[in-house]
């Protein structure tokens, strides 16, 4: 059985002190196999919950906050700005900035509030409930095709990649023939290995694509989110760059994040047979199981988007000064032993604090409900259709994505 590593790396990072005498940890964010937890995050959570770090790219240093309550405090603190990171070479794990300037991820209120309002209704409970039937239809079609082809099958090709891609394509009104092109762009933008020039070239291509689609939708609107955003642009509610950045954000998260999350969930279940058996015996446990899988699985490498302090702020006895950069780790917060009992163990019956996998505060992921629904649909369909579902290769033979922001298997060979 594969479990996430809970032991710090034996090699200590020898780093100089920061301006206030705090040790600065050089964090390379190395490739981690399977669902192993980052040893530096694990150690800082327990020994130095507000620490200074330096990542591979960018300039300077940043604070990293890891404990559950401290992470919530930072994520909801209005004096910490996302917008101030624009055009600032913040220390970063990628050579290029993934989130576009002016996009929903790098704005502050009131601009952030305005942009979020334009998409929030689409991802609300009523719309997600209505989308469940379409997701279920796609899941049944795709698993039926799997069954006809016979084992072994690559689950990422058969289900966990095409279903969310098709669903977000339907939601945005992207022609089915174009979904594959968007998938190719996704691979470059969410990579930590591609250069700034390569990323910029792809960003220009995807911006051009949505600019042309916007022109078409202005004359031929459909019953989709992108048409609604184009109409809002026509009424002056958002600029063209904001419209494009929203579309790019929705495509990237809808395609890549869900693909990896659900693939990781299946792998975790197949390598924890006691938990899989419990879920098969108690199918009503599925929503709770999805929450525990979200908490347990380290779904990304490194950290997300930074913030910049606009005034001095005290966090857990450390003073973050105005102008300094702050990161939070939702992954580490989900393993905080003061909140979760035996946090490095997968327990589908766990009923403690809410996980922070979708963030917290104003920048809480707008697609959280959609992701949960897709996970529930895919997992329930797999468990019902394939009672004997298992890995088709040994755990040591699995190949995991490298040089990518989101963690997940390159392929997930299964048999039944």
Image (cartoon, rainbow, N blue to C red):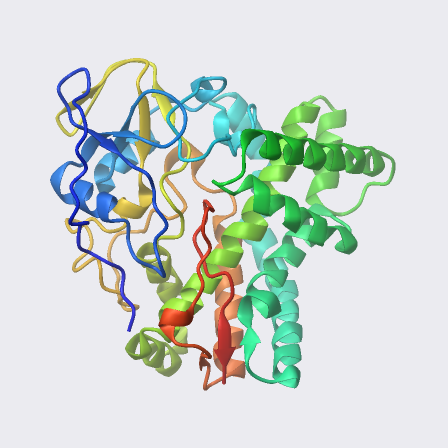
Residue 401, above or below 350: above
One can see residue 233 in this view: yes
Q: Quadrant of residue 243?
A: top right
Residue 195, above or below 140: above
x%, y% of residue 63? 26, 27
Q: Quadrant of the N terminus?
A: bottom left
- Tell which of 65 and 391 is nearer to you: 391
Q: Quadrant of residue 294?
A: bottom left
Name the side, left or right, on which 180 lies relative to 191.
right
One can see residue 286 in this view: no
Residue 348, above or below 188: below
x%, y% of residue 218? 82, 34
Q: How many marks?
A: 0
Query: Going 69% across and 37% down the picture, which residue do you hit?
Result: 206
Q: Residue furthest right?
A: 219
x%, y% of residue 10? 15, 49
x%, y% of residue 192? 47, 40
Query: Going 38% across and 46% down the picture, which residue do you hit?
Result: 301
- Tell which of 186 and 196 is nearer to you: 196
Query: Going 63% across and 62% down the picture, which residue do you hit?
Result: 162
- Tell which of 77 and 308 is nearer to you: 308
Name the side, left or right, on which 121 lies relative to 375.
right
Name the side, left or right, on which 243 lies relative to 84.
right
């Amino acid at each position: 059985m594969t479990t996430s590593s809970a032991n710090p790396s034996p090699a200590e990072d020898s780093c100089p002190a920061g301006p206030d005498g705090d040790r600065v940890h050089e964090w390379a964010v190395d490739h981690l196999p399977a669902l192993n937890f980052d040893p530096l995050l694990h150690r800082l959570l327990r020994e130095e919950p507000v620490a200074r770090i330096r990542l591979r790219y960018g300039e300077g240093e940043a604070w990293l906050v890891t404990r559950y309550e401290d992470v919530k405090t930072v994520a909801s603190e209005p004096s910490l700005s996302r917008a101030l990171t624009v055009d600032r070479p913040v220390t970063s794990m990628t050579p290029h900035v993934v989130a576009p300037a002016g996009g929903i991820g790098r704005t502050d209120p009131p601009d952030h509030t305005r942009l979020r309002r334009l998409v929030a209704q689409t991802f609300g409970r009523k719309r997600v409930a209505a989308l469940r039937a379409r997701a279920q239809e796609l899941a049944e079609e795709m698993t039926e095709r799997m069954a006809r082809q016979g084992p072994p099958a690559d689950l990422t090709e058969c289900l966990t990649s095409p279903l969310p891609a098709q669903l977000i394509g339907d939601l945005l009104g992207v022609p089915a023939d174009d979904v594959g092109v968007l998938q190719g762009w996704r691979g470059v933008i969410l990579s930590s290995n591609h250069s700034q020039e390569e990323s910029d070239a792809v960003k220009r291509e995807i911006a051009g694509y949505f600019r042309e689609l916007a022109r078409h939708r202005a004359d031929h609107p459909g019953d989709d989110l992108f048409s609604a955003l184009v109409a809002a642009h026509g009424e002056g509610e958002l600029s063209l760059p904001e419209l494009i950045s929203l579309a790019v954000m929705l495509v990237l998260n809808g395609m890549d994040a869900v693909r990896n999350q659900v693939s990781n969930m299946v792998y975790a279940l197949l390598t924890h047979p006691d938990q899989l058996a419990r879920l098969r015996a108690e199918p009503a446990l599925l929503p709770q199981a999805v929450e525990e899988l979200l908490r347990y699985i380290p779904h990304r490498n490194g950290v997300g988007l930074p913030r910049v302090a606009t005034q001095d702020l005290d966090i857990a006895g450390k003073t973050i000064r105005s102008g300094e950069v702050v990161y939070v780790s939702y992954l580490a917060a989900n393993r905080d032993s003061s909140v979760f009992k035996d946090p490095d163990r997968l327990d589908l019956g766990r009923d403690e604090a809410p996980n922070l996998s979708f963030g917290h505060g104003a920048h809480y992921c707008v697609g959280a409900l959609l992701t949960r629904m897709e996970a529930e649909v895919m997992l329930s369909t797999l468990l019902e259709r394939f009672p004997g579902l298992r890995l088709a290769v040994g755990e040591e033979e699995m190949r995991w994505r490298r040089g990518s922001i989101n963690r997940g298997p390159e392929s997930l060979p299964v048999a039944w």
